[in-house]
Image: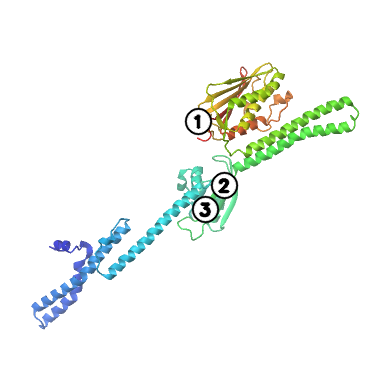
Amino acid sequence: MFNFVRNIFSIEKDTKFAARIMFLSAPAALVFMLLVLFELISPFWAVLSLAAVVIFNIAMLFPITFEMQQIRKYISKLSNGGDFDEKSLKLSEKDAKDIVSSLNAMHSFWAHKTDMLEAQTISDTAVLDSLPDPIVMIDRAGNILGANLSARSFFGEDITDKNVDALFASNNFINAVSKVLKKESKSENLIFYVEKPASRKLYAHIKQLPWLSKGRAVAVISIYDMTKAMNIEKMQSDFVANASHELRTPLAIISGFIETLQTSAKDDKKARESFLKIMQEQAEYMSSLIENLLSLSKIEMKQDNLPEEEVNVIDVAEEAAQALSQRAEKRNMGIKLKFGRNIPEITGDRAQIKQVIQNLTDNAIKYGASDSKITIDIEKANAIPPSKSYKVAEGEALAISINNKGPKIGPEDLMRLTERFYRMQEHKDKNIRGTGLGLSIVKQIVIRHRGNLTVSSTSLNGTTFTIYLPISLHK
């Protein structure tokens, strides 16, 4: 019976509607009982009056109960993120309508705030992930709460499961972080060295976050790897020192001969002719050295700019062979060109590719055995062999091999051939002139073209330098 009535009036079971009616009607029932007790009214009229009071209370309480029930459903639906049609609410009380309007306004406000916060969070995450240096956020206990993409790549994807103490085995770093977390310092900057996973020189900036920042993060740590910059500085320092040394020797020779010609050999015609010849050789060497240094500098300046010319490598090889043919003839050497079928044009820097072929062919003439042949062979390759120090281009390539029949080059020398100013002791002993920069120039040009250089040397077949250049750099 009660369920039937409840269904008719859409009253839910847990609204305690009946209990409220009884509670409101209890004082009237007590009054009517006293009136009957003192025989001031008859029991019939007492029951009839109490029934009227109950009906009145029901009529007054039902609308409020029914509308509060709808509002509760509405709030519950909104709090769970569900959709609820406001128009389906049957509200007659002004206060109930005001409550729903306020709820709608509050819901719209916080929904907008949530959207803004999500968009800001996505934006902040994207910005942090785009930064090249590792950044981590830590709580008061030193636990890592967040890390950008660079930090996850540097330390591993499980970095947020670690404490900051586990990042580096460096007491200086741990002490600096501890000072910031204990509020002994607002920020700390330090340079420290680590040996694992590899020997590195690192710079760390640890800074307290402002108290307005939300969440449990109290400090942020940014790491900068100074190893590469340090190596570049060392290379520059070594380069300047080597260049200075290479220039100092011929300058000293020229200065010495000039002083001799001005004094003791002033009137010695034979000595003057001999000294002038040596001075000319030293001047030519300095000129070649300076030219190579300038060439190397220009190549490095363009290192980040991919070449865009369409280059016919066969034409370039023929031009290089023609330019060096007279030098080869002086040593009774011939230059043989071999081309595979359907050799395509490649994307590259024509002048630099010609410089590569000329440098390698010139070395083949200089260090190869006299009365032998130099072979320039151009073939298609399916792929470029990978490099340990840089990323090579993908796809098909041209393999340009230059072979001479000179003596075998030992493994220890092969590893150092492309070092700047490096010259084999055997060549120095034979007084073969060279700046030690030719192969360094070749290497830098090959790197700019995202190619690779390989060298093989045997007693039977001599030495072969193979340059791999991608057919297309813009796929």
Residue denoted by label 1: 395
Distance of label 2 from label 3 (alpha carbons): 13 Å
Residue that extends furthest to the top in the rendered view of this protein? 371
Q: How many marks?
A: 3
Q: Residue at x 50, y 26 (%)?
A: 382
Residue 302: x and y, percent?
61, 38
Position above or below: 210 against 284: below
The image's colour scheme reads: rainbow
Residue in the foreground of this view, choosing between 231 and 109: 109
- Local packing at callout 2 (Cα closer than 10 Å; few below 14, some 14-19, many 20+) is some
Q: Secondary structure at mark 3?
A: strand
Q: Position of residue 186 (x, y in %)?
A: 56, 58
Hey, which quadrant is residue 292 in on the image?
A: top right
Distance CA(mark 2)–CA(mark 1): 34 Å
Which numbered disc flags the more N-terminal residue, 1 or 3? 3
Looking at the rendered structure, the kind of residue marked 2 is: Tyr
Give the amino acid type for the residue marked by disc 3 in the picture: Val
Horizontally, is 463 left or right of 161 in the view?
right
Determine the residue positioned at 32% across, 65% down: 101
- Quarter holding residue 277: top right
Residue assigned mark 3:
220
Q: Which mark is residue 224?
A: 2
Question: Regarding mark 2 in the picture, which secondary structure is present there?
Answer: strand
Kindly indicate the quadrant of the structure image that contains residue 64: bottom left
Please state which of residues 24 and 282 is positioned toward the viewer in this rendering: 282
- Residue 379 shows in this picture: yes
